[in-house]
C-alpha cells in the first residue's frame, strides 16, 4: 500500500504574491484595455522588483479582452511557458491567482502575472445579458428571461426575497453592509467613492434597481486594471516588499448549480461557496474562526450574507445579525472589504479584493486591521466560484 497522500501535492505556502499594481479607478479613463493592463502590470513588477523579461507565466479571466500574445509582445516578456484563463466573470479572481500559483509551484513557470483590465464604465463593453451578447445557459432563455428576470441584479433580487422570507432579514441588514464598505472607501484615497459619504437615510431613500435591491446594493461600474506577481516562496523573501503567501486555494460549485440563479435546487440559498469552503478549509491550517480579515466578493450586498454563512462565519440564517454592531468594520468581529470593495472602491471583477488582501498583510491598507496575520479572499457567490487564504 502506498503512503501517498493528496497533501503531498499541496501548494500550501509554496508561492507568494510579491508585487501588486493598479491604474486609477474612474469612469471614462483614457487608453485602451491593453494600455490599462500594461500600466497595472508594470506597476506590479516594479513593486516586486522583477524585470519584464523574467515573466514566463500569464493568468487572466476568460472575459479579458487583452490577449496573452499581444500583451507579451508589447511589454517584452520572456518566453511564456504557462498561460491560462478562468471563466465566470466575478467567479474568477482567486482562481486566476490560484492557477498561477499552481503553475509556479509545479515548475511550469517561474514568474507569473495575473491581471484584470476593464473599461466597463466607458459604456463600450457589451453586457452579457444584452441583446446579441448571448447567454451562458439555455436554461435562462427558457425559464427566466421570458418572465422579466433579465439582469444579474434581477436574479439576485429573487434570491434575496427568498432569503428575507426564510430568515427575517430586512433592508436594514443590507444597509449595514453598504454602509460598512462605504465607510472604508471614504478612508481610501484610491476609491471611487472616497468623497461620497452615505447615511442610512441616503440608503433607504435611494431609487430601486430591482426590489428589494436599491442603488446602493449594487456594485460600481469602473474603468481600471490591476495585476499581481506570483513567485515561489524561496524567491519571495528577496523581493522588494513583504510577500503574501498563498496558503490555500479552492474552486467549485455544487451538483445542482445554475449560473446566477440557483432557483431550481433543493436548497436555493446554499450556493457554491459551501462547496469551495469545504475544500478550502480541508487544504488549510487556517479555519473560519482564525480569519483576521476578509475580502468578500460584493457585486451585490446580499452576496455578503450568503458568503458569511457559506464560509462558516455564522450558521444558516444568522448572517443578518452578524452585520450588526459594526461587526463588518475595522475593529469589528470580521472586518470585510477594507478598501471599499466592489460596492464603493471599484468593480473590476473582484481583483481589487486580492490587492487589498496583500496590503492588509503588508500593513499598508488605508483601513489597516491591527495584527492581521491572514486574509480570506472570495470570488462571486452565484457563479462557479473560488477562494483563497493569504497569510504573512
Image: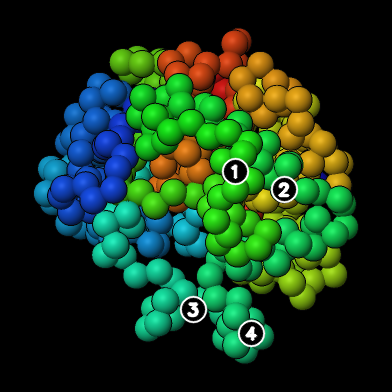
Q: Dots 4 and 1: beta carbons under 8 Å?
A: no
Left or right of residue 101: residue 51: left
**Element type at mark 1:** helix
Circle 4 residues within 10 Å: few <14, some 14–19, many ≥20: few
**CA gap, disc 4 to disc 1?**
28 Å
Disc 2, disc 3: CB below 8 Å? no
The secondary structure type at the circle numbered 2 is helix
Sequence-wise, the earlier of marks 3 and 4 is: 3
Q: Earlier in the sequence, mark 4 or mark 2?
A: 4
Q: Mark 2 and mark 1 in contact (Cβ < 8 Å)? A: yes
Instruction: Say whether residue 273 is left or right of residue 16.
Output: right
Which label sits in the foreground, 2 or 3? 2
Residue nearest the viewer, comparing 77 with 166: 166
Q: Residue at x 72, y 26 (%)?
A: 327
Label 3 SS: loop
Q: Position of residue 259 (x, y in %)?
A: 61, 69
Q: Determine the CA span between mark 4 and mark 2.
A: 25 Å
Point out the frontmost of discs 3 and 4. Answer: 4
Label whose residue precedes the other's in the sequence (1 or 3):
3
Tell me if residue 314 comes above or below residue 253 in the rendering.
Answer: above
The quadrant where residue 345 appears: top left
User: Which mark, residue 135?
Assistant: 3
List the residue tagged with mark 2: 171
The residue at 13%/43% (across/down) is 76
Q: Tell me, what colour scheme is on the image?
A: rainbow
Which of the numbered marks, if any, corresponds to residue 147? 4
Q: Which mark is residue 203?
A: 1
Amino acid at each position: 500500500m502506498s503512503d501517498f497522500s493528496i497533501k503531498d501535492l499541496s501548494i500550501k505556502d509554496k508561492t507568494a504574491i510579491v508585487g501588486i499594481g493598479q491604474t486609477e479607478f474612474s469612469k471614462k479613463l483614457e487608453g485602451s484595455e491593453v494600455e490599462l493592463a500594461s500600466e497595472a502590470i508594470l506597476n506590479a513588477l516594479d513593486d516586486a522588483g522583477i524585470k519584464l523579461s523574467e515573466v514566463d507565466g500569464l493568468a487572466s479571466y476568460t472575459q479579458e479582452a487583452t490577449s496573452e500574445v499581444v500583451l507579451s509582445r508589447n511589454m517584452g516578456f520572456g518566453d511564456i511557458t504557462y498561460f491560462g484563463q478562468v471563466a465566470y466573470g466575478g467567479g474568477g479572481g482567486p482562481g486566476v491567482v490560484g492557477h498561477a500559483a499552481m503553475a509556479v509551484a509545479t515548475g511550469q513557470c517561474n514568474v507569473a502575472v495575473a491581471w484584470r483590465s476593464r473599461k466597463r464604465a466607458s459604456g463600450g463593453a457589451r453586457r452579457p445579458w444584452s441583446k446579441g451578447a448571448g447567454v451562458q445557459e439555455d436554461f435562462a432563455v427558457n425559464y427566466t428571461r421570458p418572465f422579466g428576470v433579465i439582469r444579474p441584479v434581477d436574479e439576485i433580487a429573487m434570491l434575496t426575497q427568498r432569503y428575507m422570507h426564510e430568515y427575517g432579514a430586512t433592508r436594514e441588514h443590507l444597509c449595514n453592509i453598504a454602509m460598512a464598505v462605504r465607510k472604508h472607501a471614504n478612508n481610501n484615497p484610491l476609491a471611487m467613492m472616497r468623497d461620497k459619504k452615505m447615511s442610512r437615510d441616503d440608503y433607504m431613500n435611494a431609487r430601486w434597481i430591482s426590489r428589494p435591491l436599491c442603488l446602493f446594493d449594487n456594485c460600481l461600474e469602473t474603468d481600471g486594471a490591476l495585476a499581481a506577481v506570483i513567485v515561489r516562496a524561496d524567491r519571495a523573501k528577496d523581493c522588494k516588499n513583504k510577500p503574501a503567501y498563498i496558503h490555500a486555494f479552492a474552486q467549485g460549485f455544487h451538483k445542482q448549480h445554475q449560473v446566477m440563479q440557483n432557483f431550481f435546487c433543493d436548497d436555493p440559498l446554499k450556493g457554491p461557496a459551501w462547496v469551495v469552503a469545504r475544500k478550502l478549509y480541508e487544504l488549510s491550517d487556517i479555519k473560519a474562526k482564525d480569519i483576521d480579515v476578509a475580502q468578500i466578493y460584493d457585486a451585490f450586498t446580499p452576496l455578503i450574507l450568503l458568503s458569511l454563512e457559506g464560509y462558516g462565519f455564522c450558521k444558516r440564517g444568522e448572517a443578518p445579525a452578524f452585520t450588526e454592531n459594526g461587526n463588518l468594520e475595522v475593529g469589528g468581529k470580521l472586518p470585510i472589504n477594507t478598501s471599499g470593495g466592489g460596492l464603493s472602491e471599484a468593480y473590476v471583477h473582484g481583483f481589487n479584493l486580492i490587492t487589498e488582501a496583500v496590503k492588509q498583510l503588508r500593513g499598508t491598507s488605508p483601513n489597516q486591521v491591527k495584527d492581521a496575520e491572514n486574509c480570506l479572499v472570495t470570488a462571486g457567490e452565484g457563479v462557479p466560484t473560488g477562494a483563497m487564504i493569504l497569510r504573512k
